[in-house]
Amino acid sequence: MANEIVGGATAVAPADPAPRRRSRWQSPVVRRLLRHRMFVSGAILLLIVGLAAIFADLLAPSDPLKISIRTRFEPPGAEWLFGTDNFGRSQWSRVLYGARLSLMIGLGVVILNAVFGTLVGALAGYFRSLDNLLMRITDAFMAFPVILLAIGITAALGPGSLNAVIALAAVYTPRTARIVRASVLVVREMEYVEAARAMGATHWRIIWHHILPNCMAPLIVQLTFIFAYSVLSEAVLSFLGLGAQPPTPTWGNIIAEGRQYIREAPWITAIPGIALAMTVMGLNLLGDGLRDVLDPRLKVQQG
Amino acid sequence: MSEPLLSVRNLKTVFKTEDGQFAAVDDVSFELNEGEVIGIVGESGSGKSVTALSIMGLVPNPPGRIAGGEIRFEGRNLLELPEREMRRLRGGRMAMIFQEPMTSLNPVFTVGDQLFEGIIEHEGVGKRAARDRAVELLDKVGIAAPAERLDQYPHQMSGGMRQRVMIAMALACNPKLLLADEPTTALDVTIQAQILDLLRELQEEFRMAVIMITHNLGVVAEFAHKVMVMYCGRAVETAPVGELFERPSHPYTQGLLRSIPHLDHEGARLRTIKGTVPSPFALPPGCRFAARCEHARPACAEAEPPMIGVVPDHEAACIRLTGYRHDLTRATEPVA
């Protein structure tokens, strides 16, 4: 009789005829991502920027800090690929090394954001008694315009790239926390969470094992945007002299220095500007692609 | 048999809402012996699910709270147990299966991962032993090719199969008490019958006590040994299952039985119980069913009727039974 039952049940289920063990990299999500045009173009853009940053010392042999008065304001050309700036420094070197710092700052903000945003969001969403307290604090943070608050925090901590990371993380964490909280609120009401509780699971196990994995999709997407925002905001902070200090190149302070010469040598501002735009566009495309693919409502149509 | 496996005494579970506080379960008592099946019947909002959640210690708090009574399980009062002990009981000595097999499994993990979780947690065995046990369990609940199914995700299975997996999860640690909250409601009729058969087989094999929550009297007739009918958070009638169907004594039970469609009564209009369930915030004084009861009399509104014995083990909360003792030799309809 058991066999009959199963026969009936399998007939209903359009299950795989031959269920196999698949590794996560061959999973349908990855395959769908690779077919997603926006995701792939974003990934390629970021790959270019990322590789340029990682191999900056190979690609740009000249010292980004080396001053040469005789070669000031050389336009882009065969000898100076991206031209030179007001101190005769190679723009090519400066933009590549600048990519390093800009991306590292972005990555640092994203990591801090992921950790603290998830922590605060999960606590607020899961333990309802903490919700009001934590959310009012995040509201207080979100009441300030992003840049203003970041400027305030860096001004208090002192300028520097590490402090810029801390400031930007503090500014963006409440946003991430809000998004995580919203997903946790939804997922915590799912029956499998109640089932896990009925199985005797602890709070931490429920949060870590059952709730957070189901909140990953919006979080990942949010983090790609945060990355883009923080690369931009770091440029703004550097531009204002609150981020990395000259002569250390970041895209922001290259643009800041170049703005005085924008008539005579527009390439000084334009090239890091283009690099920045490319990175942000790459991140946004990546985020959009991830959102499309990870959104379960779209899965059915594409799968 | 000295003490019953589970004894619920005067359980009262209240919920606090913006409109005030109400008792979702009000003064409910019942007992359950080892290997015995009780069916709890009632319409939506009658407090049957909350009764089950109270026993499991899973009443969402806030807004819910167990305001009074006693729940004794294997000689211990669950309401006094610390949360850590309670957690050890849940999924170990007592387990629960839920209504919606579609949402009761975590979509991001394989079925196996979810089965292992309980086994590793409660039995303290390693991953390999847990896997062997999981295969055995899936086989037991009638899933073909269990070893392969373990590595599948919930969305690759049908509703009936998922409910089988849920049952396997509940059985993982040989519970003495199984709470089944409308386990077949969300399934196709044919699958419902299969799942019920499976549950009964497993119940007999493991000698589990089962609390079967349902609004389907057919399920009760098939599966339960005794029945408790709930209305507005109160038990209105308790009886052995045969007794209940033979001699329904509370007008509400009688109404429920009459509103089952019969295939052979061609053309007859289906009887319903008139009116709606009163708001839990505005419960009438006296009998809560009085407003919908065809036998209501002025005395009904004066005091809440106590449980009155009809025959041994059969009680109903209706004042018309006062002073009434059914003569077992005379098989006539008692009151109607």
Image (tube, rainbow, N blue to C red):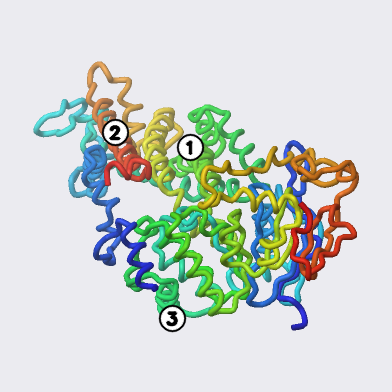
**Alpha-carbon span between mark 3 and mark 1:** 57 Å
Residue under label 3, please give it.
B129
Above or below — where is B123 with respect to A32? Answer: below
Q: Which image quarter: residue B52?
A: bottom right
Above or below — where is B163 with respect to B186? Answer: below
Q: Which mark is residue A159?
A: 1
Label 2 secondary element: helix
Residue B27, image x and y in percent?
80, 57
Amino acid tagged 1: Pro
Q: Are marks 3 and 2 on the same chain?
A: no
A279 or B50: nearer the eye? B50
Amino acid tagged 2: Met
Amino acid tagged 3: Ala
Q: Chain of mark 1?
A: A
Q: Chain of mark 2?
A: A
Circle 1 Cα neighbour tier, 10 Å, few/some/many (<14 / 14–19 / ≥20):
many
Residue under label 2, please give it.
A281
